[in-house]
Image: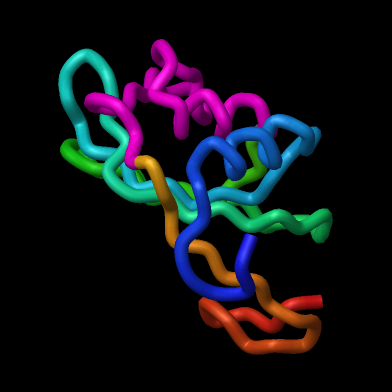
């Protein structure tokens, strides 16, 4: 994977599958009776995460740790996944590539400083 740019989704799925847990920030849209993944951010970091959730009638924004294989399944567009008690689906096949960025330690990013 490059330091910045695009990475092959298959390589990213393989990498996520090997992690016991990863930090995620998904944006979910209500699509009764399920929730559709609209956008997601994944951080491969073992640092503890303060889990938070903003839930509205038509959208939910979460910050939490999920099992790597669950996140990989979402990227592959596999069947419905349970995310913090919500049934999440991915519409259609996933893109062949994803944006990637490697951050060095003690770098400010996303309103936090990396370890």
Residue 64 percent location from the top left of the image: 60, 46
- Taking depth in this image into account, of 81 and 85 the one nearest to the observer is 81
Rendered image quadrant of residue 80: top left
101 to 107, vertically: above or below? above
Is residue 61 shown left or right of residue 64?
Answer: left
Instruction: Determine the residue positioned at 82% across, 54% down.
Output: 46
Instruction: Determine the residue positioned at 65% across, 71% down.
Output: 102
48 to 17, vertically: above or below? below
- Taking depth in this image into account, of 61 and 4 the one nearest to the observer is 4
Is residue 96 shown left or right of residue 32?
Answer: right
- Taking depth in this image into account, of 86 and 73 the one nearest to the observer is 73
Look at the image and give the residue range highlighted in magenta.
67-95
Is residue 81 shown left or right of residue 64?
Answer: left
Q: Is residue 49 visible?
A: yes
**Quadrant housing the N terminus:** bottom right
**Does residue 38 show up magenta in the picture?**
no
Residue 109 percent location from the top left of the image: 57, 81
Q: Is residue 52 visible?
A: no
Rendered image quadrant of residue 45: bottom right
Count of number-bearing discs: 0
Residue 59 percent location from the top left of the image: 24, 43
Instruction: Determine the residue positioned at 49% across, 52% down.
Output: 25
109 to 25, vertically: above or below? below
């Amino acid at each position: 994977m490059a330091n910045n740019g695009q990475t092959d989704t298959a390589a990213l799925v393989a990498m996520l599958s090997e992690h016991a847990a990863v930090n995620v920030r998904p944006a979910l849209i209500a699509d009764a009776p399920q929730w559709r993944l609209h956008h997601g951010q994944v951080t491969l970091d073992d640092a503890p995460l303060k889990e938070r959730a903003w839930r509205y009638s038509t959208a939910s924004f979460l910050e939490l740790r999920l099992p790597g294989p669950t996140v990989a399944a979402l990227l592959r567009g596999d069947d419905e996944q349970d995310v913090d008690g919500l049934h999440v689906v991915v519409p259609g096949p996933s893109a062949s590539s994803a944006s990637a960025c490697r951050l060095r330690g003690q770098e400010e990013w996303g309103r936090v400083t990396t370890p």
